[in-house]
Amino acid sequence: MTARGAAAYLQRMARAAALSFVLVATVLAARVEPAAACSCAGIDPRAALARADAAFVGVLVDKRLKSPPLRSTADAAVYTFRVETAIKGRLPARIEVESAESGASCGLEAEPGVPIGLFLDRRGGVWRSSLCLQISPAELRRAARPLPAPAGSGRPAVVVGGSFAPARTIALDRNGRTLAYGLGRGESVALSVCPGGRQLAELVRDEQRLLVAVRALPRLRRVGETAVPRSLVPRTAYPTAISCRDANASELLIFAAGEARSVVVRLRHGRFEAVHRGGRALGAAVGSRYAYLNTPRSLERLDLRTRRAAIARVPRVDGFALSPDGRRLAGITDAARPGS
């Protein structure tokens, strides 16, 4: 073979090898289908710990596909951890946890030798978790500690609602110190102090249930709780407001906002009834006689006695409140916003 022929032969081999590499890479890329990026809503560690079947601080020692070969980043993988500290539940020294293969599909993101905190669910005899249930060891240990003992004094200046398992409401004094905890499952989404300041009405989401609770002030002792019939509040509507109408909390109004439908529900002497069903609404403010609902293009005034609604065309209002005397509405709007 001449030098020129040898060079041509080597060039052809190089092109063939390059083509072969491209074909192999294409085949491999076709086998592994990327999944949508993982998106996790923020979680409250105490609430997550209360919901979890178990939790631990541990170190990854092994990872393998549950059913090879890999076809998608969402394929199940088995992660083996050495348990350093069992925060909740009785766990073995080594535990296998199923999750997606990649963090892009909300699979665990753990490096060998680096401790992580993990909340676990038990389903079908298998421990499962995800990137959304993974936190730092320090956060997990803090979530397992008891709530700080109340150190405030005097009457409550502010009552805060949320999810602080095992509490869902906290009463604070004027200096921001804790006076009392309101214990209970779920998340407090709206609060209303009753006239006279001796009781508090609370709107609560607990998994698939919507609850109304009444607490005595100032210690936040729960004196009653009842579930709102789901037939009155669509699951697509988000509860945003509650109004206590009298000192004994015998009459309450509940507002739930939805993209397609909003509702106002009354609880009076233990009985629920729908007061108003309307279209899309963003929020509500309730006075002694009228409830005001803000929709994308108007304000609706609902007469709570006659149930008649009046509509005022206004620019979109993102947030508004009723003055204590019930004679003024204050809100935030951007009149220059397109489409307002």
Image (cartoon, rainbow, N blue to C red):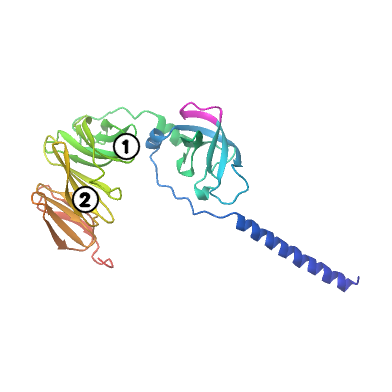
| Nearer mark to the viewer, of 1 and 2 | 2
Q: Is residue 262 above or below residue 54?
A: below
SS class of the residue under badge 1? loop
Q: Is residue 266 above or below residue 53?
A: below
Q: Residue furthest right?
A: 1
Amino acid carrying label 2: it is Val
- The residue pinned by badge 2 equals 263
| Residue range corresponding to the magenta coloring | 83-94
Q: Is residue 322 above or below residue 48?
A: below
Q: Residue at x 44, y 50 (%)?
A: 39
Quadrant in which residue 339 is drawn = bottom left
* Left or right relative to 131: residue 253: left
Q: Residue at x 37, y 36 (%)?
A: 47
Tell me how far mark 1 sits from mark 2, CA to CA: 22 Å
Q: Position of residue 24 (x, y in %)?
A: 68, 59
* Left or right relative to 300: residue 31: right
SS class of the residue under badge 2? strand
Determine which of the numbered discs, if any, sits on residue 286 in the image.
none
Residue 60: within the magenta?
A: no
- The residue pinned by badge 1 equals 186
Q: Nearer the viewer, residue 60 or 151?
A: 60
Choose the circle earlier in sequence order: 1 or 2: 1
Q: Position of residue 185 (x, y in %)?
A: 31, 34
Amino acid carrying label 1: it is Gly
Q: Position of residue 151 (x, y in %)?
A: 27, 28
